[in-house]
Image: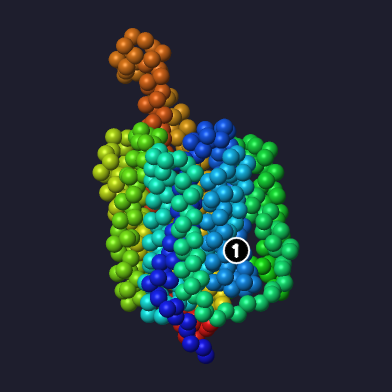
Amino acid sequence: MTTQFRPPNLALSTIGLSLATFMQVLDTTIANVSLPTIAGNLGVSNNQSTWVITSFAVSMAISLPLTGFLTRRFGEVKLFTACTLLFALTSFMCGISQSMGMLILFRALQGAVAGPMYPITQSLLIGIYPPAKRGMALALLAMVTVVAPIAGPILGGLITDNYSWPWIFFINVPIGIFASMVVANQLRGKVEKTERPKIDYVGLITLILGVGALQIVLDKGNDEDWFNSTFIIVTSIISAINIAIFLIWELTDKDPIVDLKLFRHRNFTAGTIALVLAYAAFFAIGLLVPLWLQRNLGYTSTWAGYATAPLGVIPVLLTFFVGKYASRIDLRLLASVAFMVMGATCFMRADFFIGIDFHHVALVQLIQGLGVALFFMPILTILLSDLQQNEIASGSGLATFLRTLGGSFSASLTTLLWERRAVAHHEQLAEHITAYNPASQTAMSQLGHGDPQVAGSVINNMITQQGYQISFNEVFHALGWVFIGLIFVIWLAKPPFTPKASAAAGGH
């Protein structure tokens, strides 16, 4: 039995780890609102500019499940420091890019080095905190995970409007350098066993092709009209074949690059399923509400950001209490309350209408924050609870990868459903507008001031708006039931929920 490592300054170590993670998670959303400006400056179409998001997402999705392998090879501290420094470097290169090709290349490299940062942060925090305070560390990480994506679009909009788009990348440089120096200095005495595992080339190649192709399909499906596009069909076939080979190979290989046998642990399996589905539903909310505010209610991107921002208030305020006292309550009960609150806010949104005011939208976001505050920390604790210390980085990387993939599936499915159902409702509503309907005739004469073309255009816009609104309400009604269903999933986990690592005093 070895003594658990303690850094000279636990608070400073936590700040360094959290800052790097905040920077990495922030970069998943900060460029979204800047795409039109980037496209204009680099002389490409808006459609081409979306590859700035896709390239980052594809590379990160590929590198995330490799975290366990890379940790065994280089050690957690060295890998974290290297990834954080490289993230700062690739961010700088993104900022000085003179063409869209350059920007996409460096965003892809940025995504590749970003992948391991979150799971290693999770593993290092669990390793340096005493067992009694690990809940606090995970609650802090959960807060960062929630606040950073909310802050991203607001910060991106403000920087782009007041300075220039390269600064959304340049701000990472001092943060990355500071965080990597702090962590390298504080954790330099941490003894880590490294090995030279055989590189599983079949697993690596099929992972890159399978997951890369799948992420492209999910990101580009809506733009390309899904399976009406030859590109989407071919990419889907490539993805399906490679993922099938990857799964068979990894389950039978003696030294797999991704350890799928982690699913033998009951709590890891139940916790990961709950995390993936809950995050997918949470991601759908985060995507659909700003889109609806801008398309249906006419908000600017900045005001849409302000309306959704209250989501982060309660998680920030409750982090300390959740971290300190959550371990005294059955974590399954805490997660169930979280799912009930998040389900309830979805049902509230299912009653939204076009004339709703800013305060009601913001209030529901604020209430949802209570659910979010009670959701991440219990789920993370449950899924890591029956892993050995040497499995935590690998398990965290695998769970985070599946969570990210769940978010991508959710984004594609949510926007597809919203669009398709809106079209269907438009057709149903338009059926009632005929020359033989007295109400239609009255509306046409009043709205068009005698001009039937003007009246027709006004009525068509109103029907389109109502179609999107009804579709929005339907999607949120379904999301509400998803959260209620997750209550049953989380009760498949079994106590105790104290990480096994604590029994071995850290096991380092």
Residue 48 image offset from top left, x and y in percent: 58, 37
How many numbered markers are drawn?
1
Residue 224 image offset from top left, x and y in percent: 60, 37
Above-or-below relation of 148 to 44: below
Which residue is rendered at x = 29% and y = 15% of the image?
446
* Residue 77 appears in the figure: yes
Looking at the image, residue 337 sits to the left or right of residue 37; the answer is left
Residue 138 image offset from top left, x and y in percent: 41, 69
Q: Secondary structure at mark 1?
A: helix
The residue under label 1 is which amino acid type? Pro
Could you say which quadrant of the image residue 259 lies in?
bottom right
* Residue 21 appears in the figure: no
Which residue is rendered at x = 34% and y = 40% of the image?
303
> Please, which residue is most extreme toward the right here?
202
Along the line of sight, the residue nearer the viewer: 487 or 162? 162
Residue position marked by numbered label 1 in the rendering: 65
Along the line of sight, the residue nearer the viewer: 446 or 436? 446
Which residue is rendered at x = 44% and y = 78% of the image?
7
Could you say which quadrant of the image residue 372 lies in?
bottom left
Above-or-below relation of 7 to 92: below
Along the line of sight, the residue nearer the viewer: 174 or 80? 174
Q: How is the image coloured?
A: rainbow
Which residue is rendered at x = 43% and y = 62% of the image?
19
> Please, which residue is most extreme toward the top here?
450
Above-or-below relation of 222 to 378: above
Residue 57 image offset from top left, x and y in percent: 56, 51
